[in-house]
């Protein structure tokens, strides 16, 4: 099957999962993982699966960003990033890809996404999953206090991030904003999208760092300079 056919198949599976979610969201505990996913990799998947099981979340929404305000590198086309997420989560019934942010015009902010989710799925309880490093800088986000009113935040600490610094900041945020923040150490894989992009530019293998169909998509679409001489 060609990679284009696999994307179409993945969209079909994803549409079924969205339809089921829209009919049964009331009372569900739903994790939301945003990010550029440039590209999505196994550490993303392993992290949210660990959190899903630990906190008994019913579904995980993967929300690729459209035009994020804080990213400095030349981000890959948003539809390519969305397609890679579709391919990565296609066969997991509990993982759903949403295109809310990539279809939004202008800059995309977490608070706007959470408002959209709460408005459209009022009976669901949302848990926004982010890195502990992002929590340390969250006061730079748009409407920071409203973010905390709209969702419980799960701050995932991974290798290389200071748990002590993150916990100190979390305590300050909980006091200042009456925020509900859960700190969790995730024994995940030490993989980053930055590392993967660098490996690809160097002509090195990324097998076993990203899902097989994501790897195929990268090479067939010549992303991250893989087709450059």
Image (cartoon, rainbow, N blue to C red):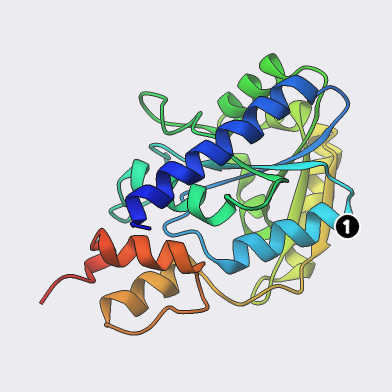
Residue 24 location, quadrant: top right
Q: Is residue 37 above or below residue 13?
A: below
Secondary element type, mark 1: helix
Residue drawn at (47%, 69%), measured in percent from left and top? Answer: 212
Foreground residue among 41 and 181: 41
Residue drawn at (67%, 16%), measured in percent from left and top? Answer: 120
Tally the marks. 1
Direction from residue 87 to residue 229 in the image, left or right: left
The image position of residue 61, as x and y in percent, is: 65, 40
Residue farthest along the front direction in this orientation = 1
Residue 152 location, quadrant: top right
Residue drawn at (42%, 33%), measured in percent from left and top? Answer: 102
The image position of residue 141, as x and y in percent, is: 57, 37
The image position of residue 86, as x and y in percent, is: 50, 47
Foreground residue among 55 and 165: 55
Residue drawn at (23%, 71%), measured in percent from left and top? Answer: 226
Q: Is residue 71 above or below residue 24?
A: below
**Residue 98 in view here:** yes
Foreground residue among 203 and 179: 203
Query: Badge 1, how many Cα within 10 Å: few under 14, some, many 20+?
Result: few
Q: Which residue is mark 1?
A: 54
């Amino acid at each position: 099957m060609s990679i284009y056919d696999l994307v179409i198949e993945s969209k079909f599976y994803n549409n079924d999962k969205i339809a089921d979610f829209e009919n049964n969201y009331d009372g569900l505990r739903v994790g939301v993982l945003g990010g550029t996913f440039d590209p999505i990799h196994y550490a993303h998947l392993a992290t949210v699966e660990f959190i899903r099981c630990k906190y008994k979340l019913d579904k995980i929404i993967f929300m690729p960003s459209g035009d994020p305000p804080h990213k400095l590198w030349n981000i890959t086309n948003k539809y390519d990033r969305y397609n890679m997420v579709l391919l990565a989560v296609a066969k997991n019934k509990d993982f759903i890809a949403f295109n809310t942010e990539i279809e939004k015009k202008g800059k995309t902010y977490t608070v706007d996404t959470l408002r959209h989710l709460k408005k459209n799925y009022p009976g669901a309880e949302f848990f926004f999953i982010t890195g502990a490093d992002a929590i340390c800088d969250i006061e730079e986000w748009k409407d920071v206090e409203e973010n905390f009113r709209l969702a419980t935040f799960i701050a995932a600490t991974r290798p290389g991030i200071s748990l002590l610094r993150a916990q100190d900041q979390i305590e300050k945020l909980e006091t200042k904003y009456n925020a509900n923040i859960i700190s969790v150490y995730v024994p995940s894989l030490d993989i980053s999208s930055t590392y993967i992009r660098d490996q690809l530019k160097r002509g090195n293998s990324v097998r076993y760092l990203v899902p097989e169909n994501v790897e195929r998509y990268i090479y067939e679409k010549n992303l991250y300079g893989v087709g450059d001489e």
